[in-house]
Image (tube, rainbow, N blue to C red):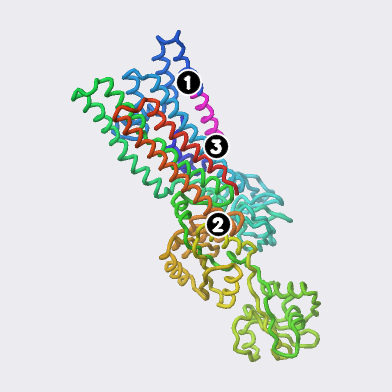
Amino acid sequence: MAHNHEHENHSDCCGSGHCHCHGGEEEKNIKLDFTIIFICAAVFALSFIPALEPFALWICLAAALVSARETVKEGIEGLLKLRFDEATLMTIAVAAAFVIGEFREGAMVALLFSFGEELEDLAVERSKKNIAALADIRPDSANVVTESGTELRPAKDVALGTKILVKVGERVPLDCRVISESVMADASALTGESMPVNIPEGEILKAGCVVLASPALGETVSGYGDSAAARIIDMVENASEKKGATEKFITRFCGIYTPVVIGLAALVFLVPWIFGMLTASEAAHRALVFLVSSCPCALVLSVPLAYFAGIGSASRGGVIIKGSEYCERLAEVKNAVFDKTGTLTSGKLRVSEIKLHGEYGEDEVLRFAAAAEAFSDHPIAKCVTEEAEKRGITYPDADKVTEIAGEGVTVTAEGKAIVCGNRKLFEHVGIALPAESGPSLYVAANDVLIGSVYLEDTVREESKEVVSALHELGVEHAYMLTGDNERAAAKVAEECGLDGFFASLMPEDKVTRTEEIKASGTTVFVGDGINDAPVLAAADIGAAMGMGTDAAIESADIVLMKGGLSALPRAISTAKKVVKCVRQNVAFILAVKVVVLVLGALGYAPIWLAVFADVGTCLLALLWSLRLLRIKY
């Protein structure tokens, strides 16, 4: 029979650390255990038939030992090793019930306890199914290129530096460097972005992407267990290893609570019996009620289950929460801090303003700029030509093209010498510029400045809604940290509805600002770039967008895999529901136990009430926690 403690470290399940490989077998075991428990329950019911009364004790004993065989085994081992846990306490309580003649109650406690544990295991298995679904993003085999063609091999056996071929429609099995022409790929499984991405020759094509348009030839740069997809799976499967404050408290609490309760139960039996207040049978009955009702299994089972169910539901919705401690912190977030480029903005540039410096109009300035930039693949060049096309402007063909890396382009168009680039290029060619800040590029015709073109990043459509949703969830302040200039930052902050921003920051400045903001409450930082890694680690909670960079992913505590920025409010909402559920369970369980323990010690609690205080509260708490599996994303 499976038990809760077996789920504490999922990486022990198999050598690779991926539990999903045994998911089907585990589910079969749970179904078999349920079948055995139901058969035992049917056997137990026979003890109530009058004709079988002489055999009632043996019937109940058989039902109890078979249904709770693992618990009894662990309990006896615990007693021999002087290790007091819920299995030890349960074994003592069931044994005591049989000793004083309350064998039906003892069997009922064993059956219900076993049923509760299996119910918890079933819930964990359902959560693991949500998690294991992520494994579909990582193929198990790869097409290895050999001298005689291609050979299909297990991906885990492919060495670094091996050439692999990924056909159209196939997922990439291992991170590889593109050695063919540029590859068009669907990276939505990793980033959550539905738009295909272009991976140029020499860049890394990550495992989990689907190759589009034409086959991709790559050279592996990571092993099967080190790929981008493998890291995602590992992060979720190992999330339960990082316990939150509540889980750690429950673990410490039970370590002290169990031996104390056994000692108190002994006093409940000995004191009234020794002083002649009760007979041995009556005193033992009270001690039994005390023992049964005091079992902490409801706390031990329901608290980890609530976190596991919440993390499982979040992973199904594309949010990876790396542990229950981050669930607790997310629920308490007071400040949200965002990077700008690629987080609040899409990273796609647009022309925001064209300032005129001579006799030419906006369209003429843009026309000559597009004529010059048509020869470049730079993002700024593409932005300029797209803007011209959007406005219906036809730009002339140019010749005598000279492109200076990092500066700009000079061309000849319609008999005019056109210069289009940054301040450095204009200083290089000797054309004077006004003392203005902000333009991304300048345009000159025949050595005369005719216009300044301002470009800005495009704000994500969901950014404003996300900030508003965070405020509704109780986040008091939303800030932006960026290395961009004040003008661009102010515009994005206003458009997103932020409470404040800090511009022109270096990575170390972002860490300093985040530390200052943390002083006013729990702070989550959201970013995606390699320069965000230090501040992701410095924040109370680091949230990485999509797959971002390896450094950002490793530094983050949660990863927003799907839905982009809009996944953040959903993650916080889930965390709040999980923490609320845990607190409700703990309060309910402790309240019931305190009442029944007092009544039991005074002799006012029947055995059925003790069973309810133990197994009844456990089942109710487990069912209450199971609701978290149904969280919609």
Judged by depth in the image, the label closer to the viewer, 3 or 2, is 2
Who's the residue at 45% across and 49% down the image? 324
Q: Which residues are magenta?
A: 21-37
Do the CB atoms of the residues marked 3 and 2 lie less than 8 Å apart? no
Who's the residue at 63% across and 71% down the image? 457
Judged by depth in the image, the label closer to the viewer, 3 or 1, is 1
Percent of width and height locating residue 218: 64, 56
Q: Which secondary structure, mark 3?
A: helix
Do the CB atoms of the residues marked 3 and 1 lie less than 8 Å apart? no
Is residue 166 positioned above or below 94 on the image? below
Percent of width and height locating residue 341: 58, 68
The label shown at residue 447 is none
Under mark 2, the amino acid is Leu
Percent of width and height locating residue 243: 42, 48
Q: Which quarter of the picture shows residue 560?
A: bottom right
The label shown at residue 568 is 2
Percent of width and height locating residue 601: 29, 30
Who's the residue at 47% across and 17% down the image? 45
Q: Which residue is mark 3?
A: 23
Q: Which residue is mark 1?
A: 40
Under mark 1, the amino acid is Cys
Q: Earlier in the sequence, mark 3 or mark 2?
A: 3
